[in-house]
Image (spheres, rainbow, N blue to C red):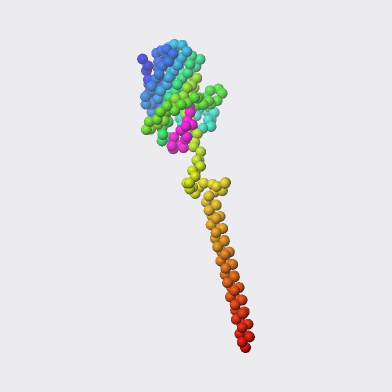
């Protein structure tokens, strides 16, 4: 039967024979976000061995990927070549806490494969969720170095009817607009009060002149 040897961040699978397709559930492997692999071959393959390793960092010979990296990993084959494969299905998972802490849009998470032409996003489907993680499945044409990655969530606009002190209105911060409005109201009130007092002083002065004129007439 199939032998599975688990370590921390690594698992080795020894397969006596593959008759076109074999499903291998890996169980729980510490520090590894892959829990199942399905190898499909064009012909019968004997004494196949694959090792899946979680990588602590991007290998120096691998170019950077324009995405938020969740994990790098590699699958190393033995006694089987990519040309013998129909495809390899890789089921991986991402802890929900990791998605939240890195502000990743869970709908953008994919498995990327690196080859001589650089990174390629593999066809990836979300398969199911449990209370701790979201599970995905990708189809790869062969073994290689991979990255589980996604895009961060862009800041969402505030829905109509809701307030945001940090948003913008026509390109201007709402806080700035509020200050401008308050200053305008204060300035208007000041001008009105100034004109009101000036007019009152003018009326009082005019009344005072008339009173003195009347006094002069009485004399």
Decide: is 32 above or below 48.
below
From this viewpoint, which residue is outermost toward the bottom? 219
Choose between 198 and 105: the one closer to the eye. 198
Which residue is located at x 49 percent, y 24 percent?
123
In the rendered image, which quarter is residue 198 located in?
bottom right
Which residue is located at x 44 percent, y 37 percent?
101
Choose between 183 and 102: the one closer to the eye. 183
Which residue is located at x 46 percent, y 30 percent?
71
Quadrant where the C terminus sits is: bottom right
Q: Is residue 61 visible?
A: no
Residue 45: percent from the left, percent from the top?
44, 12
Residue 15: percent from the left, percent from the top?
40, 15
Quadrant where the N terminus sits is: top left
Residue 200: percent from the left, percent from the top?
58, 72
Does 26 appear in magenta? Answer: no
Decide: is 80 above or below 122.
above
Choose between 182 and 48: the one closer to the eye. 182
Q: Which residues are magenta?
A: 99-111
Instruction: Locate residue 200 relative to residue 104 in the image: left or right.
Output: right
Residue 174: percent from the left, percent from the top?
53, 50
Decide: is 49 above or below 197.
above
Q: Is residue 193 visible?
A: yes
Does 104 appear in magenta? Answer: yes
């Amino acid at each position: 039967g199939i032998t599975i040897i688990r370590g921390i961040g690594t698992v080795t699978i020894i397969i006596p024979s593959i008759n076109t397709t074999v499903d291998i559930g890996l169980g729980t492997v510490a520090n590894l976000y892959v829990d199942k692999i399905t190898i499909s071959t064009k012909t019968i393959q004997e004494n196949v061995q694959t090792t899946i390793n979680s990588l602590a960092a991007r290998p120096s010979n691998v170019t950077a990927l324009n995405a938020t990296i969740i994990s790098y990993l590699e699958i190393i084959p033995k006694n089987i070549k990519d040309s013998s494969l129909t495809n390899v299905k890789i089921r991986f998972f991402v802890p929900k806490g990791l998605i939240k802490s890195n502000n990743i849009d869970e709908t953008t998470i994919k498995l990327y494969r690196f080859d001589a032409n650089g990174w390629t996003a593999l066809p990836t489907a979300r398969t199911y969720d449990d209370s701790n993680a979201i599970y995905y499945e990708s189809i790869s044409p062969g073994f290689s170095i991979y990255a589980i990655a996604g895009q961060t969530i862009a800041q969402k606009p505030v829905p109509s009817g809701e307030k945001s002190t940090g948003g913008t209105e026509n390109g201007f911060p709402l806080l700035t607009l509020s200050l401008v409005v308050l200053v305008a109201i204060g300035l208007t009130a000041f001008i009105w009060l100034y004109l009101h007092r000036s007019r009152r002083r003018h009326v009082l002065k005019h009344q005072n002149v008339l009173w003195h004129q009347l006094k002069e007439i009485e004399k």
